[in-house]
Image (cartoon, rainbow, N blue to C red):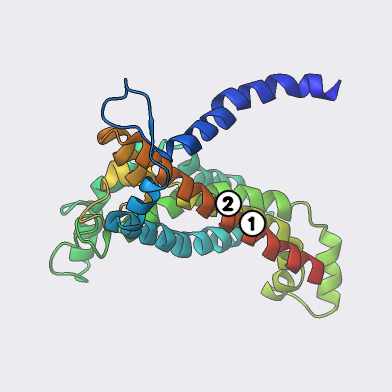
Amino acid sequence: MPYLFLLPAMVLLTLTVFWPALQAFYLSFTRYEYDLTQAPTWVGLANFERLLQDQVFWQTLGNTILYLICVVPLLAIAPLGLAILVNQTLPGMHWFRTAYYTPVIISMVVAGIAWRWLYAQNGLFNQLLQQLGWIDTAIPWLTSPDLALFSVMAVTVWKGLGYYMVIYLAGLQGISADLYEAAALDGSDGWGKHWDITLPLMRPYLLLVGVISAISATKVFEEVYIMTQGGPLNSSKTIVYYLYERAFQDLEISYACTIGLVLFILIFSFSVINLKLGQGRNLSL
């Protein structure tokens, strides 16, 4: 009986996820491009050899790893601080929760366009900084190779703060107030109680947020497409955006599948490492 209930979902997943994934794996060993009316031609490891010599791919891989290093810690720590703040029983606190969560429900297309206006040469950020006297000339937020990727990262962090805050908030509300009272009797009060009580009990949620934010960071696409389109000089181009270019702009389907396979291995490896580290911490705890 349980398998009968699972059957519709398994059929749907097979048609939309598992079978396309197997096809993409097969196509990564073929040549299937330009004229998509022709059958794929088996080429073995030729696509992988090309990938090893592709400088743009290595640049996008570096950008993706940098995205992971910068974004994931922020999205694992900052939302926890916000969750602790909005978990207080103060008048009007639900309005703050709503305000922090509002960016989550805003479409990334709308958010990207709005932030692109804010980053513009005559946008709000540059005008505000110039009026304060902090800069003399406008900062090229999205047109500088040194700043473009970090400017896009800021949008990702801003968009994800509220989502991960809600996950942490659910965990915080499951912690008994008696534990904090007992910690206060032992002399642990203020922020010390969060170090002694909150962080140890929130480790499963930290692990969950770490895995989810890492997967999201490696698959970032909309922000790059709307704000920079990978420029300037590929400085903000990520693996997923490079895959999109090869597949849908240049119709190099087989090569795009090879990039997708590498992306899958990267995400899977990072998730396994994160889960293993999390299990080790839980065992030590």
Label 1 near label 2: C-beta < 8 Å? yes
Position of residue 79 relative to residue 45, above or below, is below
Position of residue 123 relative to residue 113, above or below, is below
The CA distance from mark 2 to mark 1 is 6 Å
Judged from this view, the residue extending furthest toward the bottom is 187
> From the viewer's perspective, is 265 left or right of 194?
left
Q: Position of residue 239 (x, y in %)?
A: 38, 50
Residue placed most toward the observer, 153 or 124: 153
Q: Residues within 10 Å of mark 2 (few under 14, many from 20)?
A: few
Q: What residue type is disc 1 on?
A: Val
Residue placed most toward the observer, 256 or 115: 256
Q: Position of residue 152 (x, y in %)?
A: 34, 53
The residue carrying mark 2 is 268
Q: Which element carries disc 1, helix, strand or loop?
A: helix
Residue placed most toward the observer, 226 or 38: 38
Q: Position of residue 227 (x, y in %)?
A: 28, 46
Q: Position of residue 115 (x, y in %)?
A: 31, 47
Inspect this view and state whether residue 118 appears.
Answer: yes
Q: What residue type is disc 2 on?
A: Phe
The residue carrying mark 1 is 272
At 36% from the left and 57% from the top, the residue drawn is 52
At 45% from the left and 54% from the top, the residue drawn is 157
Where's the C terminus, which quadrant?
bottom right
